[in-house]
Image: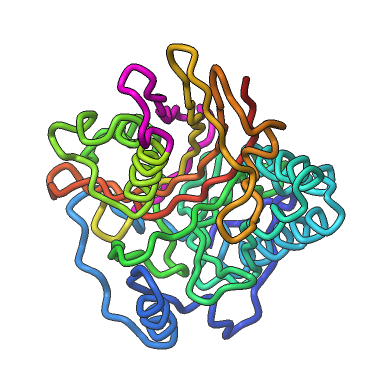
């Protein structure tokens, strides 16, 4: 193993820790979680040699036990900040989008206390921690962690060290999509090579893949005529909810007064990390922003109740401070996304494998 910088988060894992012996095939849903745990306890046959760049060119810069300690620190800060509703307590481990999303969440909870029940709650239980074998900075790692409150929910937590004097931090975690098979990941004792945002040996560069996924979320299949993005539950949920909202609002409404609803997604620059999979492809994490805009036309008025049919608050409507809109109603969100991108020579499609969506605000006139 390469020497660990004295200013980094290096902390030795006890000899014989199971975190140092994992090789696994990740999958979606509860059955996949069981398979994952079984894989952690058995010796696995070495994966086929990838046809792309080597995923195991050198030992990890830090080991999985050291990074598991980082996850523990992150979750400790998150729990303390959540309890106190104080975003300043997220530092120094939780930065970027993760800090922004939590800051907005605490502001929303002040107005709608029930919103606290919707917060994602990653735990300190790391099923897998995959470190990078790359010496260059920033250094990337990905941890698959469980949810504190729900069995079967996992998050891909991105970990990143900006430079030799900085601690490992996270700018976000993506909730693993259910019922989607994931690629073979190298054993965490082996580590994986980092993947640049402009890596051009993949089916698409990570930068272009995130841009295309944002476009597909915004415009549907028309944005992807070559069918390069595979379906995933988040796409289905978003497109179904928009159509359902459009149908509900425009029942028995004259054609010239129909309200329009559209949600547009953009990629958040500066937040990216990626690691090679055993087949030479890559698992990559990035962040998006989106706004869902409802617009009225021809002087029409739209009224939206501030509770659901079962009496739960509609947080976005309550944040807007009104239930009747004569011009527009805008809801802002942030997303952390995980994609699997295969090698170009392997073919196939880009597979979204995880998304976490956070409400950032709402307003209307």
Quadrant in which residue 178 is drawn? bottom left
Q: How is the image coloured?
A: rainbow
Is residue 319 shown above or below 160?
Answer: above
**59 left or right, relative to 313:** left
**200 left or right, relative to 67:** left
**13 left or right, relative to 331:** right
> What stretch of residues is rendered in magenta?
249-276
Whether 270 is among the magenta residues is yes
Q: Give the x, y percent position of residue 256.
A: 33, 17
Report the residue at 40% width, 56% height from top: 192
Report the residue at 24% width, 29% height from top: 223
**260 left or right, relative to 19:** left
Query: Which of the pair 231/308 is nearer the observer?
Result: 308
Q: Which quadrant of the figure contains the C terminus? A: top right
Is residue 77 shown above or below 100?
Answer: below
- Is residue 282 visible to the viewer in this orientation of the structure? no
Query: Which of the pair 108/175 is nearer the observer?
Result: 108
Is residue 356 shown above or below 39?
Answer: above
Q: Give the x, y percent position of residue 81.
A: 81, 53
Q: Give the x, y percent position of residue 195.
A: 38, 43
Q: Give the x, y percent position of residue 243.
A: 34, 40
Is residue 272 shown above or below 278?
Answer: above
Query: Which of the pair 251/295 is nearer the observer?
Result: 251
Secondary structure predominantly adopted by residues drawn in magenta? strand
What number of labels is visible? 0
């Amino acid at each position: 193993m390469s020497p660990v910088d004295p200013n980094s988060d290096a902390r030795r894992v006890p000899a014989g820790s199971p975190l140092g012996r994992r090789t696994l095939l990740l999958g979606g849903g509860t059955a996949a979680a069981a398979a994952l745990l079984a894989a952690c306890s058995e010796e696995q046959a070495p994966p086929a040699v990838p046809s792309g760049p080597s995923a195991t060119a050198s030992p990890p810069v830090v080991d999985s036990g050291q990074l598991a300690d980082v996850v523990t620190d992150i979750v400790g800060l998150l729990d303390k900040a959540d309890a106190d509703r104080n975003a300043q307590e997220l530092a120094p481990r939780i930065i970027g989008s993760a800090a922004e999303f939590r800051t907005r969440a605490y502001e929303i909870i002040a107005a709608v206390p029930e919103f606290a029940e919707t917060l994602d709650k990653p735990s300190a239980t790391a099923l897998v921690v995959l470190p990078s074998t790359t010496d260059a900075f920033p250094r990337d790692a990905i941890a698959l962690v469980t949810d504190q409150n729900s069995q079967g929910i996992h998050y891909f937590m991105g970990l990143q060290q900006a430079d030799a004097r900085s601690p490992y931090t996270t700018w976000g975690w993506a909730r693993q999509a259910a019922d989607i098979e994931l690629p073979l990941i190298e054993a965490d004792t082996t580590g994986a090579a980092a993947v640049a945002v402009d890596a051009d040996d993949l089916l698409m560069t990570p930068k272009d893949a995130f841009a295309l996924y944002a476009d597909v979320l915004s415009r549907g299949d028309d944005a992807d005529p070559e069918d390069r993005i595979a379906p995933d539950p988040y796409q289905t949920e978003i497109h179904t909810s928009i159509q359902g909202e459009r149908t509900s609002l425009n029942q028995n409404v004259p054609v010239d007064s129909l309200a329009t609803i559209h949600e547009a997604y953009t990629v958040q620059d500066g937040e990216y990390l990626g690691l090679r999979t055993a087949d030479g492809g890559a698992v990559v994490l990035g962040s998006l922003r989106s706004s869902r805009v409802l617009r009225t036309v021809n002087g029409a008025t739209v009224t939206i109740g501030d509770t659901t049919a079962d009496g739960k608050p509609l947080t976005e409507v309550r944040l807007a401070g009104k239930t009747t809109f004569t011009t527009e109603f805008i809801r802002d969100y942030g997303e952390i996304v995980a994609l699997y991108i295969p090698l170009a020579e392997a073919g196939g499609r880009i597979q979204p494998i995880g998304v976490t969506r956070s409400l950032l605000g709402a307003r209307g006139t």
